Amino acid sequence: MSTPRRFLPSIPALRALEAVDRLGSASAAAEELSLTQGAVSRQLQALEAQMGVEMISRDRKKLSLTPAAQAYVAEIRQALGQIANASLRLQVAPLGGTLNLAILPAFGMRWLMPRLPEFSRLHPDVTLNMSTRLRPFNFGSEHFDAALHFGDPDWPGTDRMLLRNEQVLPVCAPGLLPDGLPVSPRELLDLPLLHIETRPSAWQDWFRLNDIELPRPLTGTMYDQFATITHAAQHGLGIALMPDYLVEQDLATGRLVPACGPAVETGGSYYLVWPINKARDPALHTFRDWLATQAQPEDPLPR
């Protein structure tokens, strides 16, 4: 259903309203917009007439926005910025388009990056811009086309594709284990445990999977990123419960060793998430189709 014309004011009128609100006067807005002060005033009058709402408070010395108009501008300003950014992307976009992707630092660096040379080789006309985000965000307030996300991607207005389920295993420095050998799950309770903020219940879930009833609340130090908890484990500060793809190289070189048993699958998973209104974006479509070839089940990367 098309939007009624009365709800779609002209862009010049909206720019004039936004400029008056931001700069505080019609003369300053006119200078920024390269218009006369009279032209700005006429645009504001036309906007008031179209919307049927008083938007400008006028006195002899100052022109200002009514409270209702100020609230309106707060929403319109974001929309004007989105239009400007979309227009810029349209003008400078390469043939295959541009994809703005939010990634998790560890998963993006260790899982996605080693695979991207293949994507670049197959689709050199697609530009991929990446920014790291540790926590979910609002697609409406940040200009991302998609995100690599862990957990339940329950954002409204989005769709998703499963990339892989997470498998974790306890690891530590070789010298931390008695006799340098793996121990039983119950014996881990006597060793210092390292925790990460993004998985606050990871250890409790792991012990439950191993049929261990915890006699007391778990203690241990907390870390905000996998990079820091990995270094802590390497320096013998405790046992870290790590996704297997993050410690493959450390295990291969002996910097870390398994503290107990093989990796086990947890309830968490990694997804590619995108707003439904961007589902037909050509760059996203190309990236999504390629990423589907990398998702579970997959062949291991060459070492």
Image (cartoon, helix red, strand yellow):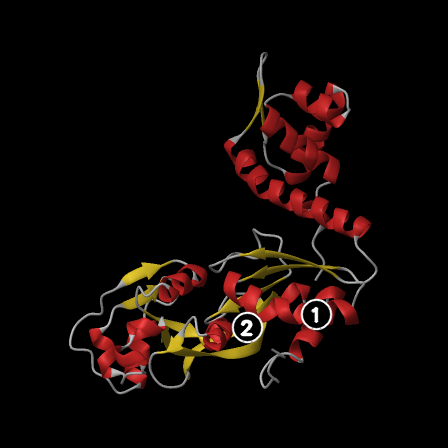
Q: Position of residue 167 (x, y in %)?
A: 45, 80
Read off the residue under disc 2: 271
**Residue type at mark 1?**
Phe
Q: Position of residue 150 (x, y in %)?
A: 48, 69
Q: Residues within 10 Å of mark 1 (few under 14, many from 20)?
A: some
Residue drawn 50% across the image and 69% down it: 153
Q: Is residue 296 left or right of residue 47?
A: left
Q: Is residue 171 left or right of residue 54?
A: left
Q: Residues within 10 Å of mark 2 (few under 14, many from 20)?
A: many
Q: From the viewer's perspective, is residue 197 above or below residue 58?
A: below
Residue drawn 36% across the image and 66% down it: 233
Read off the residue under disc 1: 287
Q: Position of residue 25 (x, y in %)?
A: 62, 21
Residue 285: in sight, yes or no? no
Q: From the viewer's perspective, is residue 228 above or below residue 239?
A: above
Q: How many marks?
A: 2
Q: Position of residue 108 (x, y in %)?
A: 56, 65
The residue closer to the viewer here, 242 or 274, is: 242
Q: Quadrant of residue 121?
A: bottom right
Q: Are marks 2 and 1 in contact (CB under 8 Å)?
A: no
> Which element type, helix, strand or loop, lies under badge 1?
helix
